[in-house]
Image (cartoon, rainbow, N blue to C red):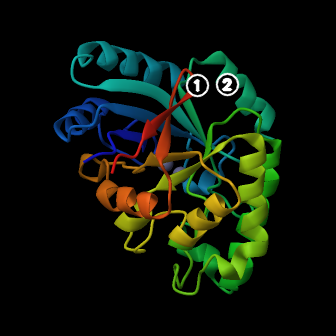
């Protein structure tokens, strides 16, 4: 494996994972990864019926620092967070990112019209295309309010959950909504995440799909981060080999990792 960093990982500090952080650390080290970044969910004001996606940041940081020391000879462990965007949260998120010494911050859109598209009930009586379009529109408007983030997480996350999943989805059909998101990232100097969980979910593609990554490059985008979004040890660095081939085919020469919010380029070696 040539990609040696996984920059999107969850543990039992996130609402939707039961895996102790130490188990994730040991598995990542056994896979030969050099650097991992834990990015627990922080979705402030998440609608209560779907759970509370908040995290005890002090406890998370304390455990991370303990393991960082304990495993420092085997693997580098970085402190990250995945912020769930919603209108009017940007100020609170900015305060939090100032208060904690994060290495890396992912901005993600998990909600659509204030509801969770993960829930099948959300889709009842709805037109999939309209929902996907609304998702991209809401994502861009939320992203424009965010000040403090390093990468945009799983840009087309919503296509994991629609009734037809990604069967009728293509970049071309949504170009008018997706291009402005890519352009915004490029102008702001932010990264685009390649999230391999789409491969795990059986979509046959990462999020975002290849055609979106190709378009990002065409528009001048060069900065990508790579993460498996693993919530369990067996999904760490999931299909990174395929991601690596794909990125090279598309012409990307490096990927970005962050320490203390500062980017470093790691070459994608042939
Ligand atoms: Zn996410
Ligand atoms: Zn995640």
* Residue visible at 21% across and 23% down in the picture: 74
Q: Which residue is mark 2?
A: 96
Q: Which residue is mark 1?
A: 262
Disc 1 secondary structure class: strand
51, 132: nearer the viewer: 132
Disc 2 secondary structure class: helix
* Residue visible at 38% across and 66% down in the picture: 199
196 to the left or right of 222: left
* Residue visible at 24% across and 15% down in the picture: 70
Respond yes or no on whether mark 2 lies under 8 Å from ligand 2.
no
Residue at the far front: name it.
270
**Image x and y of residue 108, in percent:** 62, 49
Res. 147 image quadrant: top right
Q: Is residue 89 above or below residue 139?
A: above
Between the residue at mark 1 and the residue at mark 2, the CA separation in whole angstroms equals 18 Å
**Image x and y of residue 248, in percent:** 42, 58
Residue 29, disc: none
Residue 87 shows up from this direction: no
Residue 188 shows up from this direction: yes
* Residue visible at 75% across and 65% down in the picture: 179
How many marks the image carries: the answer is: 2
Report crowding for label 2: few under 14, some 14 to 19, many 20 or more residues within 10 A (C-alpha): some
Q: Is residue 249 above or below residue 194?
A: below
């Amino acid at each position: 494996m040539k990609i040696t960093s996984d920059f999107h990982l969850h543990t039992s500090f996130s609402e939707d994972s039961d895996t102790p952080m130490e188990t994730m650390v040991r598995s990542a080290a056994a896979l030969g990864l050099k650097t991992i970044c834990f990015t627990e969910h922080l979705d402030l004001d998440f609608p209560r019926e779907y759970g509370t996606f908040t995290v005890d940041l002090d406890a998370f940081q304390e455990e991370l620092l303990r393991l960082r020391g304990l495993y420092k000879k085997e693997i580098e462990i970085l402190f990250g967070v995945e912020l769930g965007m919603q209108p009017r949260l940007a100020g609170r998120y900015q305060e939090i990112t100032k208060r904690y010494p994060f290495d890396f911050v992912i901005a993600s859109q998990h909600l659509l019209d204030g509801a969770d598209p993960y829930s099948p009930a959300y889709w009842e009586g709805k037109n999939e295309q309209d929902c996907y379009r609304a998702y991209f529109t809401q994502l861009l408007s939320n992203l424009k309010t965010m000040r403090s983030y390093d990468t945009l997480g799983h840009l087309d996350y919503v296509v994991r959950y629609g009734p037809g999943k990604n069967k009728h989805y293509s970049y071309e059909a949504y170009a008018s909504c997706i291009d402005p998101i890519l352009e915004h990232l490029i102008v702001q100097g932010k990264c685009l995440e390649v999230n391999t969980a789409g491969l795990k979910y059986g979509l046959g593609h990462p999020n975002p799909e290849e055609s979106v990554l190709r378009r990002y490059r065409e528009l001048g985008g060069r900065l990508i981060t790579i993460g498996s979004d693993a919530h369990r040890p067996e999904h760490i660095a999931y299909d990174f080999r395929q991601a690596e081939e794909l990125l090279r085919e598309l012409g990307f020469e490096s990927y970005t990792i962050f320490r203390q919010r500062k980017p470093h380029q790691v070459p994608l070696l042939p």
